[in-house]
Amino acid sequence: MAIVQAPPAAAPAHPRPASRDTAIDFVRALCVLGVVLLHAIMVGVTVSEGGPLFENASDGTAWIAPLSWLLQVMPLFFVIGGFSGSIAYRRLHERGGSAVDFVAGRVHRLLRPAMYVVAAVALALAALTVAGVPAELIATAGFRYGQPLWFLGVFLLCQALLPWLVSAHRRAPLRAIGALALAAVVVDVVRAATGVEGLGFLNLGFVWLTLQQLGFFLADGSIDALSRKVRGTAGLGALLVLAVTFLAGVYSPDLIANINPPTTALLLVGVAHTSLLSLHRARIERFSRRPLVAGFTGFVTRRAMTIYLWHMPMLLLMAGTTAVFSLTAGISLPALDSAEWWAGRPLWLAVALALTALAALAFSRFETQSPPVATASTHRLVLGTLSGLIGIVLLLVLGTSVATAVIAIALIAGALRLASLSAHVPVRGGTLGLL
């Protein structure tokens, strides 16, 4: 983790204005909305003679593949993360900050809201246990909650490595992104040749780091400097290659299936997304300044991580409430993917968005409050980052239970303590453009 000692980034070749980029903020807000909608539509609740069943409503369906082309926004998420992170790092350096200060700020912005939501989930699981809910259902709820946390862990890793990777981009941009992309391809090839599926999880690093690196090119103006023909050809070429891999059976046309573990198909999606964003950025900028659009963007931008962390607990609350209502009222629930089930999806999605928004309003202060002022050393920061990562991985690998949640909270609290910010850098909550 000597990465945090990397020299600061040079100013972009085509620097952006000091104000926030409203087009990028709007697209990021749409990505957050897309994630919530995708997870909400995948939640399936039915009740049988044996009790309630919580399933993935998209399993074995024909609609998930085309829907994934619309709502698989994670590649763009990481491109924008690279864009925002590199600019935030440069601005922090201009104010006298260092790589240590940047990573410490990221650790606090990402892990502080996570600690509170994990604590809330632990209390909820404990209450369900006391209430006599079957252990199997509690374990299912804990598993479902923990699934989206992969993003928190991977994004934390990417942001911790960002100062070093920005430095590598400054020295040799094509070589840096090429090495990461090649590593991702090699992982896929070896995985396919050996049949060892576990090897694919190495791309939790290589795929997402490559996409973050692509965001650096967007931030320094390199992509916008290309002709519209070149950018359009790159995007169309990525889509054509992607289609060939689908037809050849290399990758699944379901882009959700390509995320666990990540495949290099997501790199092609990221190139296509970035091409579209670059080509239409001026139009998006103008649209993003409309009052209603700006209001939506501002709400989400200030609460992006809180929304991400709380949307799954809200969905689980909805699923549990639906099952209890069905059992107590004696009303049967429609079969998953039936016409009746689809008829109820608009209301389901609306309630999911409303509850998530309310949770974001209630808990966003943990994301935006100023970090404590102390002295952070590189050694402490490395230990803190690793402590936070271990806590997240624990919930992912072992599942979220009261015991694992308590351990994770302790590890995250330790991470926050170790990654306290340097007193000489004025870092205010929300000013660094988290995602």
Image (cartoon, rainbow, N blue to C red):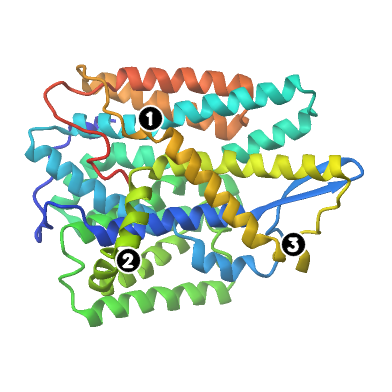
- Label 1 Cα crowd, 10 Å radius (few <14 / some 14-19 / many 20+): many
Task: Look at the image and tell me in which quarter the N terminus lies.
Answer: top left
Q: Earlier in the sequence, mark 1 or mark 3?
A: 3
Residue placed under numbered mark 2 in the picture: 274
| Tag 3 near tag 2, CB within 8 Å | no
Residue placed under numbered mark 3 in the picture: 341
Hey, which quadrant is residue 122 in on the image? top right
Gap in angstroms between the C-alphas marked 1 and 3: 36 Å
Image coordinates for residue 99, horizontal then vertical, percent = 18, 34
- Label 2 Cα crowd, 10 Å radius (few <14 / some 14-19 / many 20+): many
Q: Is residue 176 left or right of residue 396?
A: left
- Residue at position x 61%, y 19% in the image: 403
Q: Mark 2: which amino acid?
A: Thr
Work out whether 412 lies above or below 189.
above
Callout 3: helix, strand or loop? helix
Hey, which quadrant is residue 272 in on the image? bottom left
- Please identify, in this view, whether the residue under mark 1 or under mark 2 is nearer the observer: 1
Q: Is residue 82 left or right of residue 149?
A: left
Callout 2: helix, strand or loop? helix
Image coordinates for residue 251, horizontal then vertical, percent = 55, 66
Image coordinates for residue 293, horizontal then vertical, percent = 34, 62
Gap in angstroms between the C-alphas marked 1 and 2: 31 Å
Q: Mark 1: which amino acid?
A: Phe
Residue placed under numbered mark 1 in the picture: 366
- Residue at position x 46%, y 26% in the image: 115
